[in-house]
Image (spheres, rainbow, N blue to C red):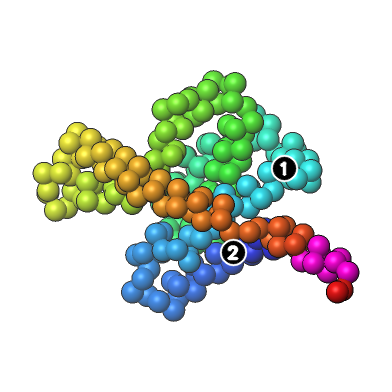
Amino acid sequence: KALKFALALIALAPLMRIATYVFWPSARGHIPIMLHTRIDALMFGCATALLYDRERFNRFYAHVSGRAVVAASVVFLFVLSPLLESRFKGGYQLPVGYSLEGCCITLMMVWLIRNAQSTAGKIFNSKVARHIGVLSYSLYLWQQPFFDHDKQWAISRFPLNVVLLLVAAHASYYLVERTFLGMRQRFEKRRPTVGEISRESAATEAMPAI
């Protein structure tokens, strides 16, 4: 069910972007950052995690994961797609652009994981790269005040802004994210799983009536 839900959101995302553009004109400038218009970016990762060990996915991946295809994905993502966006604006990005970029990122991500011993794989699987990945959500949350050059704040001047962003991201990750993740793990240990509930129910039904 989770996989079907993720794939459905990927399919619906272009329609939600177009609908937002047409029926919510005042929000057009926020389409690149709104949850419902960019939900496919998150769902590509979720769907990949759910499909990763499935035989059908691995057979499909084997057909599309050649070096030439991965190289083409890199060129498309960093060269061709920006050119198409510059030329066609929302006419490209809203219906197909964001989705195609998500496909390319997914393909590159899986390839880097499964080819960790390649040159690119070693770079992106290094301790520094992995640590940046762990901090990525905190970096995303805190980047705005440190990169708002329009307000000319002292904290938004390079290189101080980069240093302060890293400090804020580390503090947010270790003091907030790790704290709540620990709380969730403790809660999950106390909460019975669906399997445990099913086994208990089956055992109860199997007991002879007294």
- State if disc 2 and disc 1 touch (CB < 8 Å): no
Is residue 189 depicted above or below 28 in this figure?
Answer: above
Please provide percent x and percent y for residue 193: 65, 58
Between 192 and 37, the one lying in front of the other is 192
Is residue 10 depicted above or below 100 in this figure?
Answer: below
Tell me, yes or no, if residue 102 can be seen here: yes
For the point 56% across and 52% down, the residue is: 189
Please provide percent x and percent y for residue 190: 56, 56
Mark 1–mark 2 distance (CA, rounded to whole Å): 21 Å
Where does the N terminus fall, quadrant-wise? bottom right
Q: Tag on residue 9?
A: 2
Residue designated by label 1: 53
Q: Is residue 200 left or right of residue 27?
A: right
Main SS, magenta residues: helix
Between 88 and 74, the one lying in front of the other is 74
Please provide percent x and percent y for residue 23: 44, 79
For the point 61% across and 41% down, the residue is: 107
The quarter of the displayed image where residue 54 is located: top right
Tell me, yes or no, if residue 92 can be seen here: no
For the point 86% across and 66% down, the residue is: 206
Q: Label 1's element? A: loop
Viewer-nearest of discs 1 and 2: 1
Q: Which residues are magenta?
A: 201-208
